[in-house]
C-alpha cells in the first residue's frame, strides 16, 4: 500500500543507508558509534513509518529490535566518548542486561519457530550477539567482519528460504540497507589496502 | 655539591642506587597479616609479585614513605653540608611528594644554609627512572643544583609512560576498574594499554592478545620517535616477565634502528600492584642535552 507514510519510510530508509554506509568508512570507534547510532535512529523511524502506513502489529518486533540497536549504539558511543572506568562499568552493565533480555527473547523466538527454519533463527541470534561483541572489540577489523556475517544472515531472511516460515516479505529497503553495510566494508578494505599503513596506537611525542 | 634522593617509584635496583650514589626511600607494602614491609628491604620485588600471583583474592596495600623516613635519609647529608635534590613519584598517585615536602620544610629550619629541592615528576616507574637517569647525567656534567632542577622540570614534561597488562585482574582488585569491565575484558582477552598522562593513569586503548599488543606498541613507538630518536632516552620495565621485556627491547631497537642504553628494570609495587605480573612498561623522554635553556 503506497501512501505518504510509506514514501516517508522509503526516504528514512535511504537516510539510514547513507549513515550505515558512512559508519563503516570511519576508523575512529567513537565517531563510528555516533554515526551508526544516528543511522539506527532513522532505521527505527523507518519501521515506525511503515507501521503507520501498514499497521503497527506487523512492525512492532522490528521497532523493538531497532530501539534495542539504537540504544546499544548510543550507549557504546557514551562509553567510548567518556572513556572513564565509571562510564564503562555503567554502560557495560546496561548492555549486559540488554543482551540477556535479547538472548531470552531470541530463545523464545527460536523455540516458537517452525522446525524447518529454526536454524535460521539460531544463526540470527548467534550473529547478532557476535556483532555486539565485534562492536566492543578494539581495532577496525572485528566489527567489520561481524557486520558482514550479520548482514548476510539478515539478507537470508529476505530470501525464499523464509517462505517456509510463512512470513516472507520482499523487503527491498531491508535488502538495500544490509547490502549497503557489506558494500561499505568492501569499499573500506579497498581504501584501507591502498592507504599508507598508520599505527593503530598513537603515542605522544616526547 | 648535591645529593640525589628518590622514592622507590624510580625502580632502581639496590646495586644501581649504590653505583650512582642515590638514596632510595622505599615504599611500604602491607599484606593483611605481615605488617608493613619496606619494598626492596624487607621484601624483594620478585617475592612480592610472586606472592601477589599465588595468593588469589589478596590485594596488598602500598603506602608512601613517611616524612620521618625522608628526614632520616636527608639529615646525614645535610649535616655533611650537601644540598639535596629529591624526586618523587607523581603526587597524583601517591603522597610521597607531600611527605618529602613536609620533611624538607621541617629540615630547612635546622639547616638554613642548605638547599632542598623536591621535584614532583608527575611520573612513575620507568618514567621516573628515566628522569632520574637524566639528573644523574647532569650531575656528572657538573650542572649546579638550580640548573639541574630547571632542566629536570622541563624533561619531566617530555616524559611519556605506557604500560600493557597481561590481565585486568589486578586493576579490578585495586578498584581501578569495575567487576563487569573486568569480566568482559577477561572473556574477550583484552589487554589494556595504559598511559601516565598529567601524572595520572588512564587507559589509552585495549588490544586482543599479547602478540598484537606488543606489535602495535612497537609500531606506535616507531611512529612517535622515528624523527627524533637521537634526542630521546628510552627505558623498558616488566613484572615477572623478563623474557618478554628482552624480546620487546630487541625488537624495538631493531624497529627504531638504535640501541636502548638503559637496563631493563623491574617495575615496583607502587605501580605494579595495579598492573600485576606479566605487565610490560616503557617510557621515553628528551635527553637533557636536547632541552637547552630555550626549551
Image (cartoon, coloured by chain):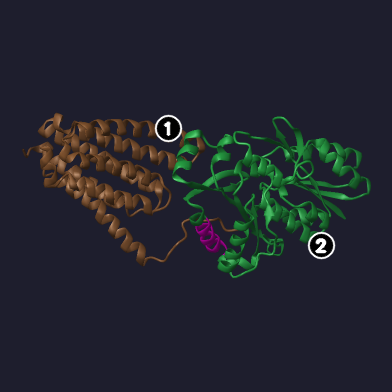
Query: Dot 1 falls on which chain?
Result: A
Disc 2 and disc 1 on one polypeptide chain: no
Position of B244 compared to B42: left or right?
Answer: left
Q: Residues within 10 Å of mark 2 (few under 14, many from 20)?
A: few
Residue A64: give x, y in percent of width and height: 25, 32
Q: Nearer the viewer, residue B4 or A119?
A: A119
Q: Which mark is residue B140?
A: 2
- Residue at position x 51%, y 61% from top? B219
Tell me which residue sits at (36%, 38%) in the image.
A74
Spot occupied by residue A205 in the image (x, y as percentages of width and height): 57, 58
Image vertical order of residue A188 relative to residue B49, above or below: below
Residue hosting label 1? A93
For label 2, the SS is helix
Give the letter of the green chain: B
Q: Is residue A161 left or right of residue A35?
A: left
Q: Which residues are magenta?
A: B214-225
Q: Is residue A109 above or below residue B236?
A: above
The residue nearer to you, when weighing A80 against B56, is B56
- For mark 1, give the secondary structure: helix
Front of the two marks 2 and 1 = 1
Mark 1 crowd level (few <14, some 14–19, many ≥20, 10 Å Cα): some
Q: Main secondary structure of the magenta part?
A: helix
> Which image quarter: residue B19?
bottom right
Chain identifier, brown in the render: A
Residue B280: x, y in percent?
60, 52
Is residue B146 among what the camera can see? no
Locate residue B251 relative to residue A10 in the image: left or right. right
- Front residue of A74/A130: it is A130
Please report the residue visible at 17 percent of the width from the left and 48 percent of the height from the top: A175
Image quadrant containing the N terminus of chain A: top left
> Which chain is indicated by disc 2?
B
Amino acid at each position: 500500500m503506497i501512501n505518504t507514510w510509506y514514501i516517508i519510510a522509503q526516504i528514512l530508509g535511504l537516510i539510514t543507508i547513507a549513515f550505515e554506509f558512512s559508519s563503516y568508512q570511519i576508523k575512529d570507534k567513537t565517531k563510528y558509534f555516533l554515526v551508526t547510532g544516528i543511522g539506527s535512529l532513522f532505521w527505527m523511524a523507518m519501521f515506525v513509518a511503515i507501521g503507520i502506513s501498514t499497521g503497527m502489529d506487523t512492525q512492532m518486533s522490528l521497532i523493538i529490535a531497532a530501539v534495542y540497536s539504537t540504544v546499544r549504539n548510543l550507549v557504546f558511543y557514551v562509553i567510548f566518548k567518556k572513556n572513564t572506568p565509571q562510564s564503562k562499568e555503567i554502560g557495560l552493565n546496561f548492555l549486559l542486561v540488554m543482551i540477556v533480555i535479547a538472548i531470552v527473547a531470541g530463545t523464545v523466538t527460536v523455540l516458537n519457530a517452525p522446525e524447518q527454519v529454526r536454524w535460521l533463527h539460531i544463526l540470527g541470534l548467534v550473529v547478532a550477539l557476535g556483532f555486539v561483541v565485534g562492536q566492543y572489540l578494539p581495532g577496525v577489523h572485528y566489527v567489520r567482519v561481524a557486520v558482514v556475517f550479520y548482514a548476510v544472515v539478515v539478507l537470508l531472511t529476505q530470501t525464499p528460504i523464509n517462505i517456509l516460515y510463512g512470513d516472507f516479505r520482499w523487503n527491498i529497503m531491508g535488502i538495500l540497507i544490509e547490502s549497503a553495510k557489506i558494500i561499505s566494508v568492501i569499499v573500506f578494505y579497498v581504501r584501507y589496502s591502498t592507504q599508507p599503513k598508520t599505527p593503530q596506537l598513537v603515542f605522544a611525542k616526547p | 655539591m648535591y645529593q640525589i634522593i628518590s622514592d622507590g617509584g624510580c625502580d632502581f635496583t639496590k646495586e644501581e642506587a649504590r653505583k650512582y650514589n642515590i638514596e632510595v626511600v622505599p615504599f611500604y607494602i602491607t599484606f593483611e597479616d605481615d605488617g608493613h614491609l619496606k619494598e626492596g628491604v624487607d621484601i624483594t620485588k620478585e617475592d612480592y609479585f610472586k606472592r601477589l600471583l599465588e595468593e588469589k583474592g589478596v590485594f596488598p596495600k602500598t603506602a608512601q614513605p613517611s616524612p620521618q623516613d625522608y628526614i632520616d635519609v636527608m639529615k646525614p647529608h645535610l649535616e655533611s653540608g650537601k644540598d639535596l635534590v629529591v624526586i618523587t613519584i607523581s603526587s597524583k598517585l601517591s603522597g610521597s611528594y607531600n611527605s618529602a615536602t613536609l620533611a624538607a620544610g621541617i629540615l630547612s629550619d635546622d639547616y638554613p644554609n642548605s638547599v632542598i629541592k623536591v621535584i614532583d615528576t608527575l611520573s612513575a616507574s620507568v618514567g621516573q627512572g628515566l628522569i632520574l637517569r637524566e639528573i644523574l647525567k647532569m650531575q656528572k656534567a657538573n650542572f649546579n643544583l638550580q640548573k639541574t632542577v630547571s632542566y629536570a622540570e622541563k624533561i619531566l614534561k617530555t616524559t611519556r609512560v605506557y604500560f600493557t597488562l597481561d590481565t585486568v585482574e589486578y586493576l579490578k582488585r585495586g578498584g581501578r576498574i569495575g567487576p563487569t569491565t573486568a569480566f568482559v575484558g577477561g572473556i574477550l582477552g583484552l589487554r589494556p594499554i595504559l598511559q601516565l598522562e598529567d601524572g595520572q593513569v588512564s587507559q589509552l586503548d585495549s588490544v586482543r592478545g599479547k602478540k598484537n599488543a606488543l606489535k602495535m606498541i612497537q609500531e606506535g613507538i616507531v611512529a612517535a620517535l622515528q624523527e627524533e630518536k637521537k634526542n630521546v632516552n628510552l627505558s623498558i620495565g616488566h613484572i615477572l616477565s623478563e623474557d618478554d621485556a628482552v624480546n620487546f627491547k630487541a625488537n624495538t631497537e631493531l624497529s627504531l634502528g638504535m640501541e636502548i642504553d638503559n637496563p631493563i628494570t623491574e617495575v615496583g609495587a607502587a605501580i605494579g600492584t595495579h598492573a600485576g605480573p606479566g605487565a610490560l612498561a616503557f617510557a621515553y623522554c628528551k635527553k637533557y642535552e636536547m632541552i637547552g635553556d630555550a626549551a
